[in-house]
Amino acid sequence: MPWSVGAGLEGRGVIVTGATGGIGAAVTRAFATTGARLLAVDLDQARLDELVASLEGEGHVGIAWDVRDVSGHEALVARAREVLGKVYVLANLAAVLQRRPSLDEVTEDDWDFQHDVNLKAAFFLCRAASRAMIEAGEGGRIVTFTSQGWWTGGFGGSVVYAASKGGVVSMTRGLARTLGPHGITVNTVSPGQVHTPMLMKDLPRETYEQQVALTPLGYAAEPEDLAGTVVFLASDHARYITGATINVSGGLLMY
Ligand SMILES: NC(=O)c1ccc[n+]([C@@H]2O[C@H](COP(=O)([O-])OP(=O)(O)OC[C@H]3O[C@@H](n4cnc5c(N)ncnc54)[C@H](O)[C@@H]3O)[C@@H](O)[C@H]2O)c1
């Protein structure tokens, strides 16, 4: 096996959701450098087109899709198989965060919205992708995204988001257990603070600064700091890692 971070990904089909987001764009670009072929999924076609046009390599496609449409996931994966051949990797980053300063401000819609995108859609898309991987018979890689909030309960009015991300950790473990016999690994990446639109939206400056002060490395991550971890988890080098929650928080949390 060649010792490069993207070993085994050349020519492989990769789906990335949340692909035009802060971390998603960095992940998509990183996969493209390995020779993988990308299906980039997010909400806005123009932004997807721009991203796809900037990628290294050939054969990448962007599809605007609301992942909350879970009844459409089989069709999305079928489309992925048409454009990529086989699907070997799903990196599921699409998520939403709605901060509410007090518990009293949390509405039922807030709860449903965040759980629909962050957890429900994640489950059904992982299932649809895993079916395609099983049929292809070559194993596969699923990388989900949780957050430090799964462990801490969340900062800055994000308790509902944190609950959805706790669900992602449990779901990832359950999927890893179920899909292991098919040679499919399932892991989740847990960022601390990463400079993206999601982090900065409605976050009180003092909360941001407190978190940076508690981070031994002394700064919030850039999206690229997460991308290498995702590519590694999808590579041949990570073939014996499954069910793991990979803490990429600059030491904010240690486990
Ligand atoms: N930025 C951070 O500090 C941080 C910390 C912990 C965890 N995370 C996680 O990392 C992942 C990426 O987050 P980010 O910081 O890049 O956020 P971001 O807001 O920049 O990107 C999220 C992307 O998901 C897309 N999306 C949202 N709802 C969608 C839907 N219904 N269908 C399709 N796409 C949808 C958005 O359009 C956006 O492009 C998320 O899972 C997030 O929860 C981020």
Image (cartoon, grey):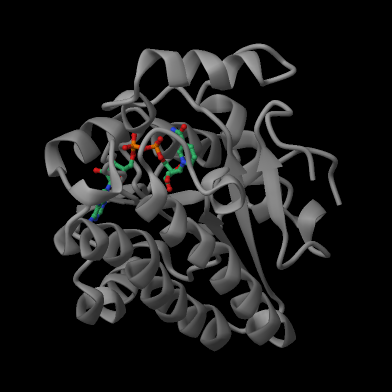
Q: Residue 46's x, y, as percent? A: 13, 36
Whether residue 155 sits left or right of residue 245 in the image: it is left
Query: Vertical placement of 38 versus 82: above or below?
Result: above
Comparing 200 with 123, the one in front is: 200
Q: Residue 207's x, y, as percent? A: 45, 21
Q: How many marks?
A: 0
Q: Residue 143's x, y, as percent? A: 57, 58
Rendered image quadrant of residue 216: top right
- Can you see residue 4? yes
Whether residue 180 sits left or right of residue 30 in the image: it is right
Image quadrant in which the C terminus is located: top right
Residue drawn at x 38%, y 43% is: 158
- Can you see residue 220? no
Residue drawn at x 41%, y 62% is: 84
Residue drawn at x 39%, y 66% is: 119
Q: Looking at the image, in which quadrant does ligand 1 appear?
A: top left
Rendered image quadrant of residue 6: top right
Rendered image quadrant of residue 12: bottom right
Comparing 209 with 22, the one in front is: 209
Residue drawn at x 78%, y 55% is: 238
Comparing 133 with 201, the one in front is: 201
Q: Residue 231's x, y, as percent? A: 63, 44
Query: Vertical placement of 7 versus 76: above or below?
Result: above
